[in-house]
Amino acid sequence: MPPSMTESSANKLINGDVCHRTANGKKSSGRNGFVKNHCLFQQPQQKKYRRPSEKNNHAVRNASLYNKPFVEQFEETPLLVAVLTYVGYGILTIFGYLRDFLRNWGVEKCHVASERDEQKDFVPLYQDFENFYTRNLYMRIRDNWNRPICSVPGAKMDLVERTSKDYNWTFEHTGKVVKDVINMGSYNYLGFAENTGRCADSATGSTHKYGVGVGSTRSEMGNLDIHEELEQLVARFLGVESSMAFGMGFATNSMNIPALAGKGCLILSDELNHASLVLGARLSGATIRVFKHNNMVSLEKLLRDAIVHGQPRTHRPWKKMLILVEGIYSMEGSIVRLPEVIALKKHYKAYLYLDEAHSIGALGPRGGGVVDYFGLDPKDVDIMMGTFTKSFGAAGGYIGGKRELIDYLRSHSHSSIYATAMSPPVSQQIITSMKIIMGEDDTTLGAERLKQLSENTIYFRRKLREMGFIIYGNNDSPVVPMMLYMPAKIGAFGREMLKRNIGTVVVGFPATPIIESRARFCVSAAHTRDMLDTALEAIGEVGDVLQVKYSRHHDFPSSLGPWSSAESLLLEPSHVKSSCHITN
């Protein structure tokens, strides 16, 4: 690896641009209500749903880089729904200020933290305006989050029932348990979140041998043989020279990016990157530029401008340019256009940092993530990052790449030098589940789970679209965002689904754009067809009650007749090819 990739961290001064979220890259001007099909193999009959601006910004320009159909759909928000959503937030804001006025005069009890009278002259600890959304909007629907679970969060789970007598400011447990709730929210992609079976047994054996905690960092007295075994296995699984494991997935990004880039470097970050990537970029001290989500035209423009203009004021060449992308974007359900990103990275001599937190184990014929999904060479990705918290049912993260890179991080990464080593039972859970995925346990269980996840994903997405919901993302992504839009429907959807024994995740502003509130489903290999049908029936009922079936189109490319196991994304998707043709 070139020396510039392992620049000393001594020069990491805080000089980075603020990494902010720009306007959503998938939006464009014009008439409302169209479907954006980011499809490599386009169907002629679907061209009426494309606009010229969308073709220029989002169409796959290098069809030869892809060996399979690449379909992503983002149906635009209907105009009336967008207007009513803004009106809804406006009404909530007006009543919020009215309630703040009543609280200030003691008419309504105030539950929020406030300054004591003797501290009025000091710098305030609590900013009223910053907490406005929390006080008046979030608290009204707070019961949809932080629900206590009292079982394994597998395909089904048990929830502790709770009530609130003060409009969600505090909760009381009723002593009852809601049994057998179908879990449609956990990142349990391959179903390894379980308390029985080979993974649980091996983790138990590891606990008896090593204990639970290590009590030291890897660089001191916490480097166990099980950690060495884990890292060698991860490197083999990824197809790279070496790898390094960390005890926390968030810190894997936030603490390692500052070791890879610093002052004089340029970081190009997707606008929808995870908070851990954003924090790591800010901590690095590098200059940060944000490109539109999955938009290769936007990325190439930034790369070209960086080379032409160089650093601000001095116009010196950048020490290095680092592109930050994710495999699957957890709020959009979209998959990175990795073949095009790699092509741009090679052409402009940049480095690529790929976060496969949601894609590793969930995509590809071998479960090798987005690199495996596109059939690419792992050597084309400079830094391969991922987490063990999703597909492996464990905790922590990893970084894989060239041996020189990993050796550098062992001595420069704060996550390596200062963090406690990974718990031995967690390490054993990862080792066992990874060997099952790789087929090294002398069974076909791993291949069966990969196939089941693929089939469940295709089936679930197709059924939701047929029912008339607006679904975001790639057809092969197990992360399925379903649009709700209006603020009042965020809480209502979560509550109504729980009444039907379905556990879901609902998301709103500021985690999403203000008019793009949504429910996010995560499909698992542990879900049976009966579970999915039960969930789909409940979603359909709630969708009718809340009137959230906003889709204006029912002839999507993904709805191509009855589903069959041969349509798995692990196999060659001939059913798509037969109805599509390659466009340039």
Image (tube, helix red, strand yellow):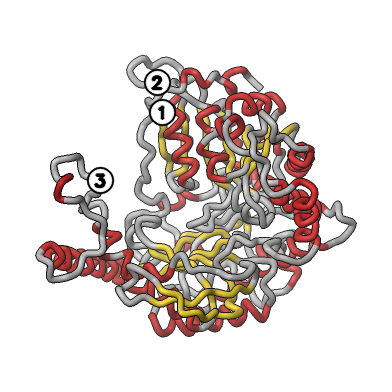
Position of residue 67 measured from the top left corner of the image (x, y, whole percent): 69, 49
The residue mark sitting in front, 3 or 2, is: 3
Q: Position of residue 406 (x, y in %)?
A: 67, 29
Residue type indicated by callout 3:
Leu
| Residue 311, label in figure | 2
Identify the residue under disc 3.
Answer: 125
Q: Is residue 184 above or below residue 253?
A: below
In depth, the one of 28 and 91 nearer the eye is 91
Q: Which amino acid does label 2 sit on?
A: Gln
N-terminal label among 2 and 1: 1
**First in sequence: mark 1 or mark 3?**
3
Report the residue marked by disc 1: 287
Q: In this view, does 208 lie to the left or right of 119?
A: right
- The kind of secondary structure element at disc 2 is loop
From this view, report whether residue 567 is shown above or below residue 369. Answer: below
Q: Work out how far the residue at label 3 is from the one at label 2, CA to CA, in angstroms.
A: 38 Å
Q: How far apart are marks 1 and 3 (CA)?
A: 30 Å
Q: Is residue 122 left or right of residue 295?
A: left
Instruction: Name the amino acid, label 1.
Output: Thr
